[in-house]
Amino acid sequence: MVKAKKWVVKKYFDGVPMKSDFEIVEYELPPLKDGEILLKTEWISVDPYLRAYNRNYPLPYDQFSFQVGVVQETKNTNYPVGTRVVTHKGWCDYVIVKEAKPVLGEVQKEILYKLPDLQGLSPSLGVGAVGMPGVTAYFGFLEICQPKAAETVVVTGAAGAVGSLVGQIAKIKGCKVIGFAGTDAKCQWLEQELGFTKALNYKKVDAQSALKAAAPQGVDCYFDNVGGELSSIIIGQMNSRGRVAVCGSISAYNEDPKKMPKATILQPPIVFKQLKIEGLMVWRWLDRWSEGFTQLVSWIKSGQLKAAEHKTVGFDKLYDAFVGMLAGENTGKAVVKV
Ligand SMILES: NC(=O)c1ccc[n+]([C@@H]2O[C@H](COP(=O)([O-])OP(=O)(O)OC[C@H]3O[C@@H](n4cnc5c(N)ncnc54)[C@H](OP(=O)(O)O)[C@@H]3O)[C@@H](O)[C@H]2O)c1
């Protein structure tokens, strides 16, 4: 019998999630049935959508997220002992999983695939730059923004998992890249390490005038991770036929849904500049994720793409890593080593 631990959400979050909203439950795993595999978790992801999806599930629920695990025992010949896999089983140290049929275009409750060939890179990238956030940046930006060389691209949440990749992919495509992030240190890192043309601390600058100065020629593509007034300001400075990929709205995830912050009305720039604004769910490209993984690994190996990570160690630290990420403690992908 294997003793396992998991984090269970027992109360809906109200504002910033509290540690008392969770409970760590210890239990014994049953023997494996045909088709099943037993995993020992190695890396667990903490992501903004764990906050955003909180009220979508009846309580109590096991805290889901992407994770990388190693097969310990198997009753599935496709997954021999020692194989590294990616699942959506989340915050648990041991877990039993089986293959699930993917439903294209929909949020997958169950997911199981072999860790892509990382060519010696850290397996933690399987929940980051070569995982769900990686393909969000890759397909979300390239498919929706359709960037052309010399165009001006703006990305918010620029120093985070998705944003830092979007900005670098934009550089690879020959664009001028302006990023918004929440500290001076992050802005310095974006400019000096990742080669962003300009990075602006949205907590300090007047976004309207700072963006005007950084992009006097206007904005062609905007990858929106944050929503709110900052996004309205950026969309207000877009050029004719500009493209906006709406990926998330983290500026409001901890807000009371009944008292959401108000932002400037967007219809005038959308109409007069004939903007294309499109929301995205990374699941849309599920059948092409492996194509994205191959390109992302190749860019990382060639040094064109830096896959920064903010690593926290310890199963007991998952909550701290989660709220730390929501508060902006991470530069790059926030990930926990079990
Ligand atoms: N649609 C999809 O399929 C999909 C898939 C993956 C992710 N997403 C979305 O993409 C966005 C980024 O996700 P990620 O995984 O890459 O997370 P991340 O950027 O690595 O981490 C979250 C970051 O959000 C920033 N933040 C927190 N509060 C903010 C606020 N009030 N205003 C502006 N920024 C704030 C913080 O950085 P600062 O220090 O800069 O504030 C923090 O580091 C999220 O909105 C997420 O929901 C969507």
Image (cartoon, rainbow, N blue to C red):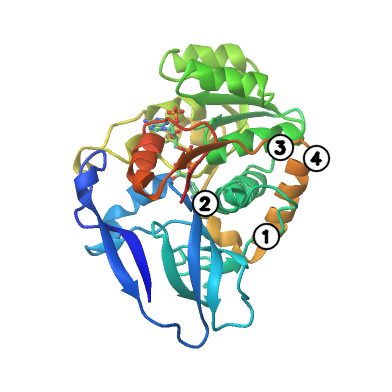
Distance from Cα at disc 4 to Cα at disc 1:
17 Å
Where residue 97 appears, as percent x and y from the top left, is 47, 74
Name the residue type under label 3: Leu
Q: Amino acid at mark 4?
A: Ser
- Disc assigned to residue 280: 2
Which quadrant contains ligand 1? top left
Residue toward you, 214 or 312:
312
Contact? badges 4 and 3 (CB < 8 Å) = yes
Name the amino acid, label 1: Pro
Give the mark, 2 or 4, whose residue is nearer the N terminus.
2
Q: Residue 181: x percent and y percent?
A: 49, 25
- Label 4 residue near ligand 1, CB within 8 Å: no
Does the numbered disc 2 mark a residue whose Cβ is under 8 Å from ligand 1? yes
Indicate left or right for 117 with 49 as reference: right
Q: CA distance from mark 2 to mark 4?
A: 28 Å
Dot 2 alpha-carbon crowd within 10 angstroms: few under 14, some 14 to 19, many 20 or more: some
Q: CA distance from mark 4 to mark 3?
A: 8 Å
Q: Which residue is mark 3?
A: 305
Viewer-nearest of discs 2 and 1? 1
Q: Nearer the viewer, residue 312 or 87?
A: 312
